[in-house]
Amino acid sequence: MFPSRGTLLDVGCGSCQVTTYLAREFEQVYALDFSETMLTAGRERIERVGATNIQLFHGTAQEFPRVVNHADVILSYGVVQYLTLEDFIQHLHECRRLLTKGGIVCAALIPNVALKKTYYREKLIPPQDQLAGELRRWMKLTRRRIKAFLEKDLLWDGIGNWFHQADVRQAANAAGFDVEFRNSWFYEYRFHALLRP
Protein backbone atom coordinates (compact mmCIF):
# COMPACT_ATOMS: atom_id res chain seq x y z
CA MET A 1 0.00 0.00 0.00
CA PHE A 2 2.96 2.32 0.34
CA PRO A 3 6.40 2.65 -1.23
CA SER A 4 9.54 1.23 0.29
CA ARG A 5 13.01 2.77 0.59
CA GLY A 6 13.81 6.03 2.29
CA THR A 7 12.73 6.64 5.89
CA LEU A 8 9.84 4.98 7.70
CA LEU A 9 8.29 6.36 10.88
CA ASP A 10 6.27 3.70 12.74
CA VAL A 11 3.93 5.49 15.16
CA GLY A 12 2.72 3.34 18.05
CA CYS A 13 5.25 0.61 17.26
CA GLY A 14 4.46 -1.49 20.33
CA SER A 15 6.81 -4.47 20.52
CA CYS A 16 8.09 -3.76 16.96
CA GLN A 17 6.57 -6.79 15.25
CA VAL A 18 5.48 -4.77 12.22
CA THR A 19 8.52 -2.51 12.50
CA THR A 20 11.04 -5.33 12.21
CA TYR A 21 9.05 -6.89 9.39
CA LEU A 22 9.17 -3.68 7.36
CA ALA A 23 12.68 -2.57 8.34
CA ARG A 24 14.40 -4.47 5.53
CA GLU A 25 12.48 -2.35 3.01
CA PHE A 26 13.80 0.99 4.29
CA GLU A 27 17.19 2.62 4.77
CA GLN A 28 16.18 4.18 8.10
CA VAL A 29 13.34 3.35 10.48
CA TYR A 30 12.18 5.47 13.39
CA ALA A 31 9.77 3.76 15.76
CA LEU A 32 7.96 5.46 18.60
CA ASP A 33 5.62 4.48 21.37
CA PHE A 34 4.48 6.12 24.61
CA SER A 35 4.82 2.90 26.64
CA GLU A 36 8.21 2.15 28.17
CA THR A 37 7.15 -1.48 28.50
CA MET A 38 6.49 -1.69 24.78
CA LEU A 39 9.74 0.09 23.97
CA THR A 40 11.64 -2.43 26.10
CA ALA A 41 9.91 -5.29 24.26
CA GLY A 42 10.70 -3.54 20.98
CA ARG A 43 14.41 -3.26 21.85
CA GLU A 44 14.51 -6.96 22.68
CA ARG A 45 12.84 -7.88 19.39
CA ILE A 46 15.13 -5.61 17.35
CA GLU A 47 18.17 -7.21 18.98
CA ARG A 48 16.78 -10.71 18.47
CA VAL A 49 16.17 -10.22 14.72
CA GLY A 50 19.42 -8.31 14.24
CA ALA A 51 17.90 -5.19 12.68
CA THR A 52 20.46 -2.37 12.56
CA ASN A 53 18.48 0.42 10.91
CA ILE A 54 15.81 0.98 13.60
CA GLN A 55 15.90 3.73 16.21
CA LEU A 56 13.36 3.69 19.04
CA PHE A 57 11.94 6.81 20.66
CA HIS A 58 9.43 7.65 23.35
CA GLY A 59 6.61 9.74 21.91
CA THR A 60 2.92 9.96 21.17
CA ALA A 61 0.83 10.02 18.02
CA GLN A 62 0.08 13.69 18.69
CA GLU A 63 3.66 14.81 19.33
CA PHE A 64 6.61 13.18 17.60
CA PRO A 65 10.13 13.44 19.05
CA ARG A 66 11.93 16.52 17.69
CA VAL A 67 14.99 14.44 16.82
CA VAL A 68 12.90 12.86 14.04
CA ASN A 69 12.78 15.59 11.40
CA HIS A 70 11.52 13.83 8.28
CA ALA A 71 9.88 10.65 6.98
CA ASP A 72 9.00 9.32 3.55
CA VAL A 73 6.41 6.91 4.93
CA ILE A 74 4.52 7.28 8.21
CA LEU A 75 2.65 4.23 9.46
CA SER A 76 0.07 4.29 12.23
CA TYR A 77 -0.88 0.62 12.44
CA GLY A 78 -3.74 -0.13 14.82
CA VAL A 79 -3.27 3.21 16.58
CA VAL A 80 -6.17 5.42 15.52
CA GLN A 81 -8.73 3.46 17.57
CA TYR A 82 -7.03 4.79 20.72
CA LEU A 83 -7.36 8.41 19.58
CA THR A 84 -10.26 10.81 19.77
CA LEU A 85 -11.09 12.70 16.59
CA GLU A 86 -9.25 15.74 18.02
CA ASP A 87 -6.20 13.57 18.79
CA PHE A 88 -6.34 12.16 15.26
CA ILE A 89 -6.39 15.67 13.80
CA GLN A 90 -3.27 16.54 15.86
CA HIS A 91 -1.67 13.30 14.67
CA LEU A 92 -2.26 14.24 11.04
CA HIS A 93 -0.76 17.71 11.55
CA GLU A 94 2.34 16.09 13.05
CA CYS A 95 2.51 13.74 10.06
CA ARG A 96 2.23 16.66 7.65
CA ARG A 97 5.05 18.48 9.47
CA LEU A 98 7.48 15.57 8.96
CA LEU A 99 6.41 14.10 5.66
CA THR A 100 8.80 14.60 2.76
CA LYS A 101 7.68 15.62 -0.71
CA GLY A 102 6.05 12.64 -2.37
CA GLY A 103 5.65 10.87 0.97
CA ILE A 104 2.64 8.94 2.21
CA VAL A 105 0.87 8.33 5.52
CA CYS A 106 -0.88 5.03 6.14
CA ALA A 107 -3.38 5.04 9.00
CA ALA A 108 -4.11 1.31 9.10
CA LEU A 109 -6.94 -0.61 10.75
CA ILE A 110 -9.28 2.27 11.56
CA PRO A 111 -12.56 0.94 13.05
CA ASN A 112 -15.39 1.71 10.61
CA VAL A 113 -18.42 3.12 12.42
CA ALA A 114 -20.60 2.16 9.44
CA LEU A 115 -20.02 -1.47 10.45
CA LYS A 116 -20.26 -1.00 14.21
CA LYS A 117 -23.79 -2.43 14.58
CA THR A 118 -22.85 -5.39 12.41
CA TYR A 119 -19.79 -6.02 14.58
CA TYR A 120 -21.87 -5.88 17.74
CA ARG A 121 -24.54 -8.15 16.26
CA GLU A 122 -22.09 -10.73 14.89
CA LYS A 123 -19.23 -10.61 17.41
CA LEU A 124 -20.67 -9.37 20.70
CA ILE A 125 -24.22 -10.73 20.51
CA PRO A 126 -24.30 -13.56 17.95
CA PRO A 127 -27.76 -14.36 16.52
CA GLN A 128 -30.13 -16.53 18.57
CA ASP A 129 -32.86 -18.81 17.30
CA GLN A 130 -35.47 -17.29 19.58
CA LEU A 131 -36.52 -13.65 19.63
CA ALA A 132 -36.51 -13.60 23.44
CA GLY A 133 -32.88 -14.75 23.45
CA GLU A 134 -31.95 -12.00 21.01
CA LEU A 135 -33.67 -9.36 23.15
CA ARG A 136 -31.85 -10.58 26.27
CA ARG A 137 -28.52 -10.37 24.48
CA TRP A 138 -29.25 -6.80 23.27
CA MET A 139 -30.20 -5.83 26.83
CA LYS A 140 -26.95 -7.34 28.11
CA LEU A 141 -25.02 -5.41 25.45
CA THR A 142 -26.77 -2.18 26.46
CA ARG A 143 -25.82 -2.74 30.12
CA ARG A 144 -22.20 -3.37 29.10
CA ARG A 145 -22.17 -0.14 27.07
CA ILE A 146 -23.58 1.90 29.95
CA LYS A 147 -21.10 0.36 32.40
CA ALA A 148 -18.20 1.07 30.01
CA PHE A 149 -19.38 4.67 29.58
CA LEU A 150 -19.58 5.22 33.34
CA GLU A 151 -16.18 3.60 33.91
CA LYS A 152 -14.67 5.37 30.86
CA ASP A 153 -13.56 2.01 29.49
CA LEU A 154 -12.64 2.77 25.89
CA LEU A 155 -11.83 -0.83 25.00
CA TRP A 156 -14.91 -2.54 26.45
CA ASP A 157 -15.89 -3.83 23.00
CA GLY A 158 -12.37 -4.88 22.02
CA ILE A 159 -12.12 -2.03 19.51
CA GLY A 160 -11.95 1.47 21.01
CA ASN A 161 -13.02 4.56 19.07
CA TRP A 162 -14.90 4.10 15.81
CA PHE A 163 -14.60 6.56 12.90
CA HIS A 164 -16.71 7.72 9.97
CA GLN A 165 -14.76 7.84 6.72
CA ALA A 166 -16.23 11.32 6.17
CA ASP A 167 -14.64 12.52 9.45
CA VAL A 168 -11.29 11.00 8.47
CA ARG A 169 -11.51 12.70 5.06
CA GLN A 170 -12.37 16.06 6.64
CA ALA A 171 -9.50 15.76 9.15
CA ALA A 172 -7.10 14.74 6.37
CA ASN A 173 -8.13 17.63 4.13
CA ALA A 174 -7.78 20.10 7.03
CA ALA A 175 -4.20 18.85 7.58
CA GLY A 176 -3.36 19.24 3.88
CA PHE A 177 -3.85 15.66 2.68
CA ASP A 178 -5.84 13.90 0.01
CA VAL A 179 -7.10 10.56 1.27
CA GLU A 180 -7.82 7.20 -0.32
CA PHE A 181 -9.65 4.48 1.59
CA ARG A 182 -9.07 0.77 1.35
CA ASN A 183 -10.93 -2.03 3.09
CA SER A 184 -8.99 -4.21 5.46
CA TRP A 185 -8.59 -7.77 4.17
CA PHE A 186 -8.41 -9.57 7.49
CA TYR A 187 -10.28 -7.22 9.84
CA GLU A 188 -13.61 -6.75 8.11
CA TYR A 189 -14.82 -4.00 10.46
CA ARG A 190 -11.88 -1.73 9.70
CA PHE A 191 -10.44 0.32 6.87
CA HIS A 192 -7.12 1.87 5.92
CA ALA A 193 -6.58 5.52 5.02
CA LEU A 194 -3.72 6.39 2.64
CA LEU A 195 -2.90 10.10 2.85
CA ARG A 196 -0.81 12.09 0.41
CA PRO A 197 -0.06 15.84 0.50
Image (tube, rainbow, N blue to C red):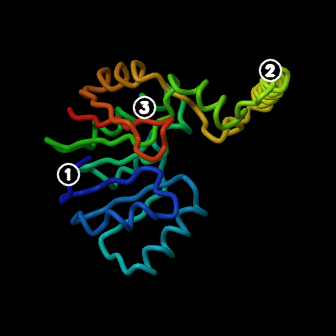
Three-letter code, disc 2: Leu
> For numbered disc 3, what is the local secondary structure?
helix
Three-letter code, disc 3: Gln
> Residue 183 at x, y = what percent?
38, 36
Three-letter code, disc 1: Pro
Question: Residue, x 32% and y 39% (percent of image)?
Answer: 95
> For numbered disc 2, what is the local secondary structure?
helix
> Residue 120 at x, y = what percent?
65, 30
Image quarter of residue 98:
top left
Tell me the CA gap for discs 3 and 1.
24 Å
Question: Residue, x 42% and y 64% (percent of image)?
Answer: 56
The C terminus lies in quadrant: top left
> For numbered disc 1, what is the local secondary structure?
loop
Q: Earlier in the sequence, mark 1 or mark 2?
A: 1
Dots 3 and 2: beta carbons under 8 Å?
no
Q: Is residue 52 left or right of residue 3?
A: right
> Residue 113 at x, y = what percent?
52, 25
Q: Is residue 133 left or right of residue 32?
A: right
Question: Residue, x 25% and y 50% (percent of image)?
Answer: 71
Image quarter of residue 170:
top left
Residue 70 seen anywhere in this rendered image of the structure:
no
Residue 89 — which label?
none
Residue that label 1 marks: 3
Residue 131 — which label?
2
Q: Quick one: label 2, few (<14), some, or many (20+) residues within 10 Å? A: few
Work out whether residue 84 or residue 110 is closer to the camera in this orientation and state it. Answer: 110
Q: Quick one: label 3, few (<14), some, or many (20+) residues within 10 Å? A: some
Q: Quick one: label 1, few (<14), some, or many (20+) residues within 10 Å? A: few
